[in-house]
Amino acid sequence: MSKKAISYLVFFALLLAGFYYAMVKYTDFEEVKLPVLNTVQPFEFLRQDSAMASQKDIRNRVYVAEYFFTTCKGICPKMNKNMKAIYEQFKKDSSFLIVSHTVNPDTDSLPVLRHYADSLGADVSNWWFLTGSKEKLYKTARESYLLDDPKNSTKNIDEQFLHTQFFTLVDRQGRVRGVYDGIKKEEVDQLMADIKTLIKE
């Protein structure tokens, strides 16, 4: 092979190497653009430590929201076992938060929520347990977090009972970016991956 041909081969090899370097440097192949599904509406609820909590207090934090009740013997223990795994993975990251709302405020008083939070080892700095009026709690679940059909609000509030196994992922701007089945391992694993994505956004 002539020196000229070798020179051309070296030139094109360097050109190809430069192309791939640029692709790797300027393209994030792992980045997943999660869709924007909804926007969380203003709310105010009481936290397990008796402090008032609102959507303004979560500004600039990625968070996962759920609905449960402390006396549940069915899906809630499974959900919160998985939520505890999420908590353990991200508890050292101050930009992440878990927000657990009771669906049964008549039973789940602040002392009850505090005891439940303590049983999970939840620190109030990054895992909130919220209560308030049943009507406002359910409205937020349906209209903000997409955790129930809004049409169900047509019933008398005293006859309603929201029981959902889904978790909602919210970004720093208060936008819903995903809804996940909280008792399916593969969906919880995907949720944790998506949390990492939003924290880096």
Image: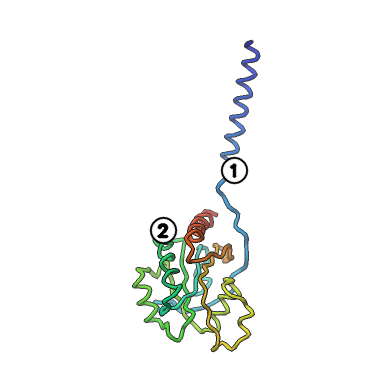
Instruction: Determine whether the residue tagged by mark 1 lies in a helix, strand or loop.
Output: loop
- Residue 180 position (above or below residue 41): above
Q: CA distance from mark 2 to mark 1?
A: 27 Å
Instruction: Determine whether the residue tagged by mark 2 lies in a helix, strand or loop.
Output: helix
In the rendered view, does 36 fall on the left or right side of 129? right
Task: Give the class, few, some or many, for how many residues have Cα within 10 Å of label 1's Cα (few <14, many ≥20).
Answer: few
Label 1 is placed on what type of residue?
Answer: Thr
In the rendered view, does 118 fall on the left or right side of 18? left
Count of picture labels? 2
Snapshot quadrant of residue 126: bottom left
Label 2 is placed on what type of residue?
Answer: Gln
The earlier-in-sequence mark between 2 and 1 is 1
- Residue at 61% over, 82% down: 153
The numbered disc on residue 89 is 2
Image location of residue 5, percent across then percent down: 65, 15
Snapshot quadrant of residue 71: bottom left
Nearer the camera: disc 2 or disc 1: 2
The numbered disc on residue 52 is none
In the rendered view, does 190 fall on the left or right side of 155? left
In the rendered view, does 174 fall on the left or right side of 93? right
| 106 vs 164, nearest the viewer | 164
- Residue at 48% over, 61% down: 188
Image location of residue 1, percent across then percent down: 62, 11
- Residue 83 position (above or below residue 148): above
Which residue is denoted by mark 1 in the rendering? Answer: 27
| 182 vs 126, nearest the viewer | 182
Image location of residue 180, percent across then percent down: 54, 64
